Image (cartoon, rainbow, N blue to C red):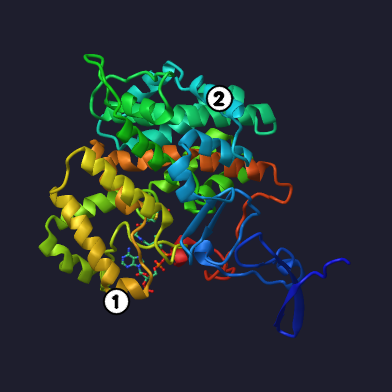
């Protein structure tokens, strides 16, 4: 028997509209309002898209209440514990975990694309040394469209695939180059015999003057940071990539748009802002002052690294990241560093404080990732570029999904116009 279509009834101004209801695999039902304007001559109003599903997606799912994050159905803690970043990339891009052969083939494709066009070295040199690495990343990734224009035709599946592999492969090289450039050291070429995370660490920390050995615990922690940040359904930067891509823009331009959006302190920039905040607090005795500021409605200050639009429970990525932070700090023998003491005490106080408890503000992934990256020796300005390189695969998977979705149109929100109604121009002498 055919299933009857469930509908939601909307009545206003004497009109009654039956709107179809769509059911996801998991998560809340969705009211399909695509015909609302045509049939009801009204729009919906939803600043920040807090209640709006903008697409179908089968890549990532978050249950904010449970604190659950699934990539293609697999829980993030299982992937962070048992898998590794390139396998997760395959899963996000192609929908299933790869067989051994498929994984080898994918890894070899990625590693064969790790070098950047030699002329890009000159392009980097055009930036000021003191530029923020995110500024450099936005520029260089956007400029990939100029260096790799043989993979910018979005209508050609092969070109889309090559662009995807190029982006995943070159992003660590570009992020490491942005770092090296900012500290005045020579660029280090990638080494394809190393795994993805070790190669990145080497490109960041090796110098031509001496050998550099990657510590496996650090490389594992780096790989986890990549895995935990790989995708996060329709967050601001992903929605930006989709919106940019909806016009038919090339993938490099779209990912550059995503990087620009990620940079903001409410999004990917929070890891940098969180560590800056911990340093600003400085000592444990100053925590109450900052907690009071965070609660004060007249003060714009927020506790960076706390709260999330979707998670109203512990961020599952933060749980894994916290374990990783303990491992890395143990390995590096960091126990009494003042920033860490402030972080631990702040976490404890915030988790017990009525304001944070009642608003369900838990530490998020950025609270702990900054602590690990700081311990590894990265300046705070590199935290968000590392987030960007990790998220690249998610952006690409979502961008590819959008290109292949026949229901997608150019993204074009409506507005609630509150400006002047039509009026006649007045000559300057008469104003
Ligand atoms: N410190 C103090 N109060 C907060 C915080 C915070 N970090 N976050 C939210 N609130 C309060 C906020 O003032 C509001 O209170 P009220 O209802 O009394 O007006 C309430 O909690 C709800 O906040 P909201 O701004 O409506 O929530 P949102 O979903 O729009 O914002 C957020 C989510 C992540 C932007 C916000 O929690 C925030 O600014 N956090 C700090 C920045 C941060 O750590 N961002 C990283 C997010 S995780 C990584 C990523 O995905 O990019």
Instruction: Let me know if residue 193 appears in the view.
Output: yes
Of residues 35 and 382, which is closer to you in this image? Answer: 382
Q: Quadrant of residue 93?
A: top right
Above or below, comparing residue 121 to residue 246 in the picture: above
Give how far across and how far down residue 333 sits, in percent: 17, 40
Q: Which residue was labeled with disc 1?
A: 354
Q: Is residue 228 left or right of residue 403?
A: left
Under circle 2, the secondary element is helix
At x 21%, y 71%, the residue is 292
Under circle 1, the secondary element is helix
Q: Which residue was labeled with disc 2?
A: 104
Q: Dividing the image into 4 quarters, which one contains the N terminus?
A: bottom right
Ligand 1 shows up in the quarter that is bottom left
Give how far across and how far down residue 200 sits, in percent: 37, 28
At x 44%, y 39%, the residue is 390
Q: Dividing the image into 4 quarters, which one contains the C terminus?
A: bottom left
Above or below, comparing residue 368 to residue 43 in the picture: above
- The label on residue 421 is none
Q: Is residue 23 left or right of residue 389?
A: right
**Which label lies toward us, 1 or 2?**
2
Q: Quadrant of residue 266?
A: bottom left
How many residues crowd mark 2 within 10 Å: few (<14), some (14–19), many (20+)?
few
Of residues 176 and 11, which is closer to you in this image? Answer: 176
Within 8 Å: ligand 1 and the Cβ of disc 2? no
Above or below, comparing residue 196 to residue 31 in the picture: above
Instruction: Let me know if residue 128 appears in the view.
Output: no
Q: Is residue 34 left or right of residue 196?
A: right
Give how far across and how far down residue 18 sits, in percent: 77, 75
């Amino acid at each position: 028997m055919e299933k009857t279509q469930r509908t939601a009834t909307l009545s206003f101004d004497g009109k009654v509209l039956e709107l179809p209801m769509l059911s996801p695999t998991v998560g809340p039902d969705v009211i399909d309002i695509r015909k609302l304007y045509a049939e009801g001559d009204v729009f919906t109003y939803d600043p920040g898209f807090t209640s709006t599903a903008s697409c179908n997606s089968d890549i990532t799912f978050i249950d904010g209440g449970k604190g659950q994050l699934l990539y293609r159905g697999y829980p993030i803690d299982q992937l962070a514990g048992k898998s590794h970043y390139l396998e997760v990339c395959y899963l996000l891009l192609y929908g299933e975990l790869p067989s051994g052969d498929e994984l080898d083939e994918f890894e070899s494709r990625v590693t064969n694309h790790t070098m950047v066009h030699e002329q890009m070295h000159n392009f980097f040199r055009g930036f000021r040394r003191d530029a923020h690495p995110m500024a450099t990343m936005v520029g260089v990734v956007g400029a990939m469209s100029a260096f790799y224009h043989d993979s910018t035709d979005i209508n050609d599946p092969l070109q889309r695939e090559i662009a995807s592999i190029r982006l995943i492969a070159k992003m660590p090289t570009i992020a490491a180059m942005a770092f090296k450039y900012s500290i005045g050291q020579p660029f280090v070429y990638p080494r394809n015999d190393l795994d993805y995370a070790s190669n990145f660490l080497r490109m960041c920390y090796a110098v031509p003057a001496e050998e550099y050995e990657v510590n496996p615990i650090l490389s594992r922690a780096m790989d986890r940071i990549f895995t935990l940040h790989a995708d996060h359904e329709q967050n601001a930067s992903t929605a930006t990539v989709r919106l940019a891509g909806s016009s038919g823009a090339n993938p490099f331009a779209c990912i550059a748009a995503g990087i620009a959006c990620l940079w903001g302190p409410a999004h990917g920039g929070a890891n940098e802002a969180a560590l800056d905040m911990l340093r600003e607090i400085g000592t444990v005795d100053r925590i109450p002052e900052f907690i009071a500021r965070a609660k004060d409605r007249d003060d714009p200050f927020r506790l960076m690294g706390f709260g999330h639009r979707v998670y109203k429970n512990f961020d599952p990525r933060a749980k894994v990241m916290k374990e990783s932070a303990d491992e890395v700090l143990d390995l590096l023998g960091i126990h009494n560093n003042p920033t860490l003491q402030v972080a631990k005490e702040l976490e404890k106080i915030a988790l017990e404080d009525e304001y944070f408890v009642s608003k369900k503000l838990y530490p998020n992934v950025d609270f702990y990732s900054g602590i690990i990256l700081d311990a590894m020796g990265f300046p705070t300005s590199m935290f968000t570029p590392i987030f960007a390189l990790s998220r690249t695969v998610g952006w690409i998977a979502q961008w590819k999904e959008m290109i292949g979705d026949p229901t997608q149109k150019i993204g074009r929100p409506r507005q609630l116009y509150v400006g002047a109604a039509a009026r006649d121009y007045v000559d300057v002498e008469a104003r």
